[in-house]
Amino acid sequence: MTAELRRYADFETLRTQATTLRRDGLSRRQIRDRLHVHNNDILNRLLEGEPAPEWTRRPNAKDDLRARARELRLQGMTYDQIQVELGCSKSSISLWVRDLPKPERKRTREEASAIAKKGWEATLRRREEERQARKEAARREIGAMTERELFLVGVGLYWAEGSKSKPYARREAVTFVNSDPHMILLYLAWLDVLGVEPDRRTFRVMIHEKADVASAEAYWADLLGVDVTALRRTTLKKHNPTTVRKNVGEEYRGCLVVKALQGADLYQRIEGWWSGMVVEARRLTA
């Protein structure tokens, strides 16, 4: 048997197995893990023509809105009025009700403009509610993190945002700079997991000289739970009159620089951890 025929036979055997598992109610992920097929194109070919089991189907969140929109249209409402009532976009409403008869126009242009504005505001509110609900659902998906998961997240976080040694400038120092307080807190939790004692950590604010420096220092000290005097001397970025600054306002607090003292050994291990993660990522996607 030629190699081509053997590959064809193997594919047909694999397709039979995949089809059987699909009809037994397994999801794509379960079939992928069971058969060790990690190529999506091949998995698609194996499952071609096989519908997903009902338990994997997500209900369409807009099904109820569609039905309600059709009811309102049949009652004589315009797109704008339906938008105000339901808070969904007029483009969606148009798709849902375009086969229904148009209501008779009974309002002035000014009235129509006011309704349209109100409808857009309702759409924005609905989008924001959906956005917040989606974020909250995603937050709950994380669940409880293990120390190992935090360890791996921290390695990636450091390699993305921390200082790195260069061949032309070997500086094996563990220094992390960020303006996001949540990133700082996660990074500090990672240092805890690594056993980097508090007395080996230094903190310094880095901010534009025209910002409210004292307020920024107080903010970062409060986040860290230390007195302002525990911070090292703030680094001020000189003002360039030709540049239009966007980092202005009360929310601008500059960046916090977190440095781990005596960090050469730790830096070298971070490099090794990151290299190991890259190797494993390639193995998983091979």
Image (cartoon, rainbow, N blue to C red):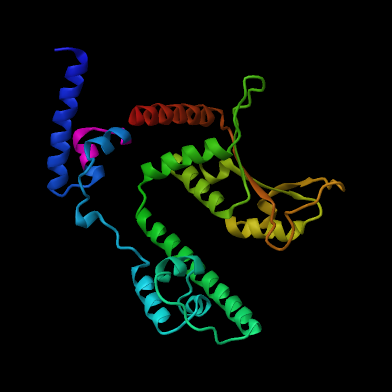
Task: Locate residue 68, reporting x and y percent.
Answer: 37, 77
Figure check: 208 above or below 127? above
Q: Which residues make up the magenta segment?
A: 31-40
Q: Residue at x 62, y 20 (%)?
A: 167
Q: Residue at x 45, y 60 (%)?
A: 135
Left or right: 199, with 58 as reference point: right
Left or right: 210, with 5 as reference point: right
Q: Residue at x 13, y 29 (%)?
A: 13
Count of numbered circles on the image: 0
Left or right: 284, with 37 as reference point: right
Figure check: 143 above or below 172? below
Indicate the quadrant containing the N terminus: top left, top right, bottom left or bottom right. Answer: top left
Magenta-drawn stretch contains 176? no
Task: Label the magenta part by its dominant secondary structure.
Answer: helix
Task: Locate residue 121, reporting x and y percent.
Answer: 57, 74
Indicate the quadrant containing the C terminus: top left, top right, bottom left or bottom right. Answer: top left
Task: Locate residue 253, reporting x and y percent.
Answer: 69, 56
Along the line of sight, the residue nearer the viewer: 235 or 156: 156
Task: Locate residue 106, reporting x and y percent.
Answer: 55, 87
The quadrant in which residue 56 appears is bottom left
Q: Name the residue at the bottom extreme.
A: 106
